[in-house]
Amino acid sequence: MQILIAGGSGQIGTLLSRAFAADGHGVTILSRKPRTLDGTSAIEWAVWDGESSTQIADEIDRADVVINLAGQSVNCRYNALNREVILSSRVNSTRAIGHAIADAANPPFVWLQASTATIYSHRYDVPNDDVTGIIGGDEPNAPDTWRFSIDVAKRWEREACEIETPNTRKVLMRSAMTMSPDPGGVFDVMMGLVKRGLGGRQGDGKQWVSWIHEQDFIRAIYWLIDHELAGPVNLCSPDPLPNSEFMRLLRQAAGVRYGLAAPAWLLEIGAIGLRTETELVLKSRRVIPTRLLRSGFEFQFADWGTACVDLCGRRAQRLE
């Protein structure tokens, strides 16, 4: 296949590009700043401003699969400027890709559009799935930053859905945190905290954590390409768990006996210093992949304990 990845220079794009190239597929990454990726000559780079559909028309026309991951990182403070950039970078890039697909003489057979599991409500009682899950935004006493993230997710998906692509199947990938041992990724950051004795529960530890192992994420992407799923699909493990248990299993896999707990007020102070938001750790994301499971997809790493052991071992090998 010829696979086009917009916004493919981040962690997720790197994982996918590496896997696709290793399997012999042609990969082109659309980015504002083209570069080489691990010296892999099979991966091509093309300049894109993130807004123009005509600029990417030729690339779209020769692609079998389009994956749009474009968007400013949410790992920042949600001030007015960052909010505008976070929203516009997602909506504008999605609009451009959608129109390029709609106008293509030879459109791709599938468009995998990034979304986020953050779109669901902050809840503890029952999980949100992609069939009956409750979209968030109306939770009482939810911080403004949480409502902003949900609004962005809804606008992001709405932009993709409003563009008609009759010859291209469209999938909205509501992804949870993807765990890989790569440097700088979310798992790597968590392990850094654990190794420094800071891997205790965060907040009250009752908020649910949804996640997916990198190998299952890549396998799920292939599954979405090969199967006739369309619309929203949750990309997450079927084993979400409370933060306190999530961190306990991570410490256990890392061989660390103790982790200092971080109350919500301390996390708020830390978030200011790190120029990020506590929503990333305090919002309860209890999400399950009903549509993937019903379609026959089988997880290699369905539970967090098993996934932790694998990720810790591979991270240790990387650091040797």
Image (cartoon, rainbow, N blue to C red):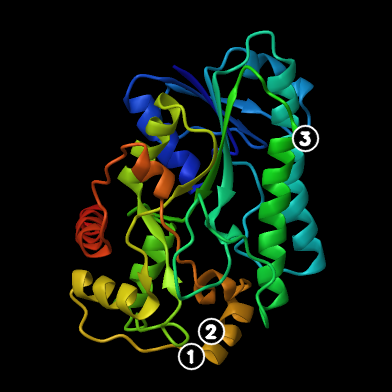
Which residue is pictured at 27% across the width and 71% down the height? 250
Q: CA distance from mark 1 to mark 2?
A: 6 Å
Q: CA distance from mark 2 to mark 3?
A: 36 Å
From the viewer's side, name the closer residue of 243 and 185. 243
Q: CA distance from mark 1 to mark 3?
A: 41 Å
Residue 139: percent from the left, percent from the top?
Answer: 65, 75
Are the residues flagged by discs 1 and 3 in contact, CB closer than 8 Å?
no
Q: Is residue 246 left or right of residue 123?
A: left
Residue receiving disc 2: 267
Residue receiving disc 3: 51
Q: Residues within 10 Å of mark 2 (few under 14, many from 20)?
A: some
Q: Is residue 226 left or right of residue 84?
A: left
Q: Is residue 270 above or below residue 120?
A: below
Hey, what amino acid is under mark 1? Pro
Hey, what amino acid is under mark 2? Leu
Of callouts 1 and 3, which one flags the residue occurring earlier in the amino acid sequence?
3
Are the residues flagged by discs 1 and 2 in contact, CB closer than 8 Å?
yes
Tell me the quadrant of the picture where the N terminus can be found: top left
Rendered image quadrant of residue 32: top right
Hey, what amino acid is under mark 3? Glu
Which residue is pictured at 53% across the width and 84% down the height? 267
Q: Residues within 10 Å of mark 1 (few under 14, many from 20)?
A: some
Residue receiving disc 1: 263
SS under mark 2: helix
SS under mark 3: loop
